Amino acid sequence: MKGVFQTLWDGYTRLTPSAKVIHDLFESNGDTIVNDHIAIRTFNDSRVDIAKMAEPFISLGYVEAGTYEFPAKKLFAKHFHIPGNSNAPKVFISELKLELMSDSLRRSVSLILDSVDPADLEDPNLVLTGRPWSKPSHQLYEKLREESEYAAWMYLYGFCANHFTVNVNELKGFESLEAVNDALEAEGFTLNASGGKIKGSKEQGLEQSSILADLQDFDFVEGVYKVPTCYYEFAMRHELNGELFDGFIAGSADKIFESTDLKLQTKLS
Ligand code: NI
């Protein structure tokens, strides 16, 4: 059987062809890509919450290693790792705090989840199943997007990897995140510049950057519209007190969440 990470990667690169292009570009330069982390999004409804998404990773030996709050985006997140195995990609799972959203958004999310056969939601590998509800409506997508870009994204793609992140420390061809960013821009990719192209700093132990999410045709009930899919991220870790920092910085992740925001895309064009 295909592993959890391979299944997520295959689904992710179908949505995000740029990730595959960049991955292959680095490998053609003689580098082997190591993933720093992958990220998964969900709602805090107990049927599909962080604990539910984490199940296949817990089976692989992952344990909780940190919690994060994103007040402006009304998100809570946890990251998981395998103790003593720094080569295993960390798993970052966030959930939208539905109790902080409008009645209308909360009702929409309930209806979406209620439309799924409860047995399908009980699948321990739910995180690998993509969108288990029927074809989205563009009207509802736009309505969700007015309040939460995150909720709108979830409505389109469901349970899958929102992004993979290249471990830049392990790239032999690049000495810094700036060098990676320059190479990506030279190849014509657009970086998320919200809060600066590099989020975080050496002093904080973690520098991150990402390309903007790919825009792809999406088949809605009302017809085909172009929407953001997923993005590829790059992380360089630094030593803090003699040890490589292995957590996340909420303030940086906050800006990186915006890589799937259509508003950021339209500002550029
Ligand atoms: Ni990330």
Image: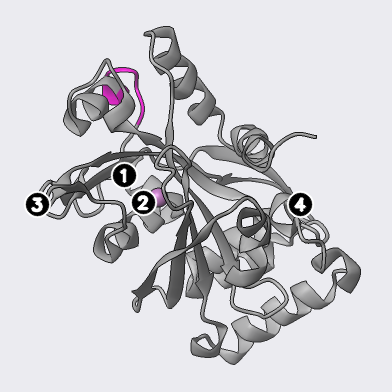
Q: Which residue is mark 4?
A: 129
For residue 264, which numbered disc appears in the image?
Answer: 2
Q: Nearer the viewer, mark 3 or mark 4?
A: 3
* Residue type at tag 4: Thr
Q: Amino acid at mark 3?
A: Glu
Residue positioned 35% across, 34% down in the render: 167
**3D distance between C-alphas at marks 1 and 4:** 28 Å
- Circle 3 sits in a helix, a strand or a loop, which is it? loop
Q: How is the image coloured?
A: one colour
Report if the CB atoms under discs 2 and 1 are less than 8 Å apart: yes
Dots 4, 2 in contact, CB < 8 A: no
Element type at mark 2 = helix
Q: Residue 164 location, x and y as percent? A: 48, 41
Mark in the foreground, 2 or 1: 1
Q: Is residue 263 magenta?
A: no
Label 4 – label 2 distance at C-alpha: 28 Å
Q: Mark 3 near mark 2, Cβ–Cβ under 8 Å?
A: no
* Residue for badge 1: 192
Q: Mark 1 or mark 4: which is in front?
A: 4
Instruction: From the top left corner, tell me how far across and down residue 256 is, in percent.
Output: 35, 53
Q: Residue at x 50, y 38 (%)?
A: 214
Q: In terms of sequence position, does the residue under pointer 1 or pointer 4 come before the other?
A: 4
Give the mark nearer the N terminus: 4 vs 2: 4
